[in-house]
Image: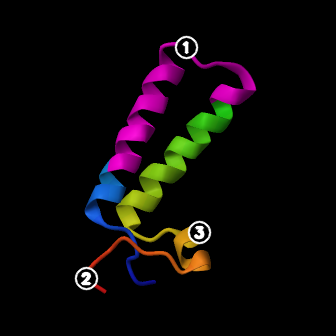
């Protein structure tokens, strides 16, 4: 797995995940939508840590300049 995500892309995903997590745990987003968004936030963090997005690979898109 080669990295296909740049640093800015990874930072944006982590910030979105933090925002979703804060909204969920403050009770602003609840129910099924809250659960789906929380799962999405976890996926964002995991993908950002690895630096590889499967959807980017599927569509041949990359924001990483190193590889």
Q: Which mark is residue 2?
A: none
Give the residue displayed 36% in from the left and 60% down from the top: 49
Which image quarter is the C terminus in?
A: bottom left
> Is residue 8 shown left or right of residue 33?
left
Disc 2: which residue: 66
For label 2, the SS is loop
Cα separation between marks 2 and 3: 19 Å
Few, some or many C-alpha atoms within 10 Å of disc 3 (few <14, some 14-19, many ≥20)? few
Residue of label 3: 55
Q: Which circle, 3 or 1, is nearer the viewer? A: 3
Which residue is outermost to the top? 27
Q: Between marks 3 and 1, how big is the CA–CA gap?
A: 29 Å
From the image, give the main secondary structure of the stretch colored magenta.
helix
From the top left corner, tell me how far across and down residue 23 is, in percent: 49, 21
Q: For the point 51% across and 46% down, which residue is it? A: 42
> In screen coordinates, is 23 left or right of 6?
right
Residue appearing at x 39%, y 34% in the figure: 18
Q: Pointer 2 and pointer 3: residues touching (CB < 8 Å)? A: no
Residue behind mark 1: 28
Looking at the rendered structure, the secondary structure element under dot 3 is: helix
Q: Which residues are magenta?
A: 12-34
> x and y percent of residue 13 in the render?
41, 49
Magenta stretch: includes residue 38:
no
């Amino acid at each position: 797995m080669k990295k296909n995500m740049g640093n800015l892309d990874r930072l944006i995903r982590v910030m979105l995940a933090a925002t979703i997590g804060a909204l969920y745990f403050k009770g602003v987003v609840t129910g099924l939508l809250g659960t789906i968004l929380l799962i999405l936030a976890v996926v964002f963090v995991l993908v950002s840590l690895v630096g590889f997005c499967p959807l980017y690979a599927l569509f041949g898109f990359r924001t990483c300049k190193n590889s």
